[in-house]
Image (spheres, rainbow, N blue to C red):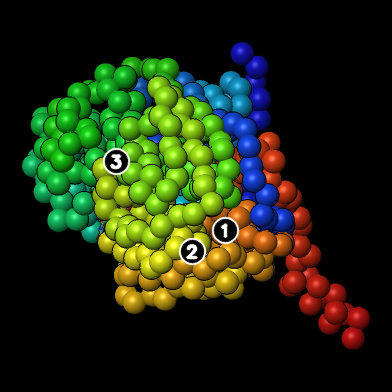
Amino acid sequence: MNRVPLLVGARGCVSLEKYVIRGGKKLNGEVVISGAKNAVVAILPAAILCDEPCVIENIPNISDVTIILQILSEMGAKVRMINKTTVEIDPTTLRNVPVPYEKAKRMRASSYFLGTLLGRFHEAHVSMPGGCDLGDRPIDQHLKCFTALGATYYIDGGMVNLSADHLIGNQIYFDKNSVGATINGIIAATKAEGLTIIENAAKEPHVVDLANFLNSMGADILGAGTDVIKIRGVKYLHGTNYSVIPDQIEAGTFMTLAAATRSNILIKNVIPKHLEPITQKLTKIGVTVEQFDDAVRVIGSDNYTSTSVKTQPHPGFPTDMQPQMAAVLTCAKGTSMVTESIFDNRFRYVDELRRMGANISVEGRVAVIEGVDGLKGAPVKATDLRAGAALIVAALSAEGTTEIYDIYHVERGYENMELKLRSLGADIKKVDEPDPAEAEKALRKAL
Ligand code: UD1
């Protein structure tokens, strides 16, 4: 096994790169889906609980992963890339170092360090998590769970500080169906004494994947994927070799891309069952979706009909696919209604689609889309990760050139998006924008 450097490509929040996309071309060919972002960002921090080194395969090269590996490394874990998609983590040398604001602000998943550090050291100091701005994103349910297990907490200067003499299993009912709180609950309870029962648990595929990862190390977790999860605490977790599931949302994004560009694309390395809510909606508007064991073929057509979409926890339509589906519906005949029931501010991309000619109005949590004949390229900006994906979907189907700014959002969650699209025949390139702040400084100097 060769020692290779940590994944590269993590950008700060001030990346000045943009995508330049010339749309209106049909795409063709096959694309291979990477490991699931939302699973790997839970699994990597959860490796802290392991009492031996462990190997994690099928990790995507995205900036969220790079940041988590950097955090682990800075805390003293030995992090070694075995190849581009496989990492070995030896957490036995890890020290309990606070997770600072600069790192935590970059992603929501930094909150998982609360559960893992509490589980391992009975103490955690983590800056309040960041991530996409989708409205209010409290962590009250995470804290409810930690306190039920015996921890106390205080928040000071933006840091969440947790400590516990002992972690003792308990019965926890979540008032909100929360992916993050369920994952943190599973993680913290894995090494607690006795039995923890989590009710109203999230059922998302990445919750199941995290539980499978922990079970592969000797944890005793039952019921992941249902709304009641039982965790019997264990004292020791042995090393494992675990492969992360394929990314449901990356696959769904390519499905909407194929639909919007009226293309024929084979999407490989997927779990078709995870894609069912997306398949159902696409089929309903007139897209053909063929399912195979670990692939789906999506065949677009020239005429789509409008539909209603309401986001729901799994197995409902995923909120992380809402913007991309809306992008497809901009050109479906008639009036479509898209209702967001998970987050209160997930329509910030609508203004950008309007710049491209979409006819969308938003009333509270409902977007009403009047189908238009086609979109036109325009300069737009990604307001968050999935908003950026929706703009790519729109740009590839639009006539003319679209420039998408703030693509660092996209790179947080999509591996090699540009290369994958180019291999399908898309006309997309990444271009470095001159830094406006630097340009202003130079101008001031010259004056
Ligand atoms: C995760 C996903 C994100 C996805 C979301 C919903 C990761 C890293 N991110 O985010 O991509 O969009 O699930 O599928 O996996 N809530 C509370 N209190 C809490 C926690 C959540 O009120 O303590 C609310 C949130 O504001 C939101 C709802 O519960 O309205 C669902 O949030 P949650 O499932 O926790 O989302 P995340 O885990 O942040």
Quadrant field for ligand 1: bottom left
> Going by the image, does 59 lie left or right of 400?
left
Label 2: how many residues lie within 10 Å, few (<14), some (14-19) or many (20+)?
many
Kindly report which numbered mark, 1 or 2, lies closer to the viewer in this rendering.
2
- The answer to whether residue 337 shows anywhere in this view is yes
Give whichever of 163, 365 is nearer the camera.
Answer: 365
Q: Report which residue position mark 1 lands on.
A: 394
> Going by the image, does 53 lie left or right of 116?
right
Tag 1 secondary structure: helix
Looking at numbered disc 2 in the image, what kind of residue is underneath it?
Thr
User: Which quarter of the rendering shows the C terminus?
Assistant: bottom right
Q: Earlier in the sequence, mark 1 or mark 2?
A: 2
Q: Is residue 363 above or below residue 268?
A: below
Looking at numbered disc 1 in the image, what kind of residue is underneath it?
Ala
The residue drawn where x is 37% and y is 64% is 336
Residue contact between numbered discs 1 and 2, judged by CB atoms under 8 Å = yes
Q: Report which residue position mark 2 lands on.
A: 330
Label 3: how many residues lie within 10 Å, few (<14), some (14-19) or many (20+)?
many
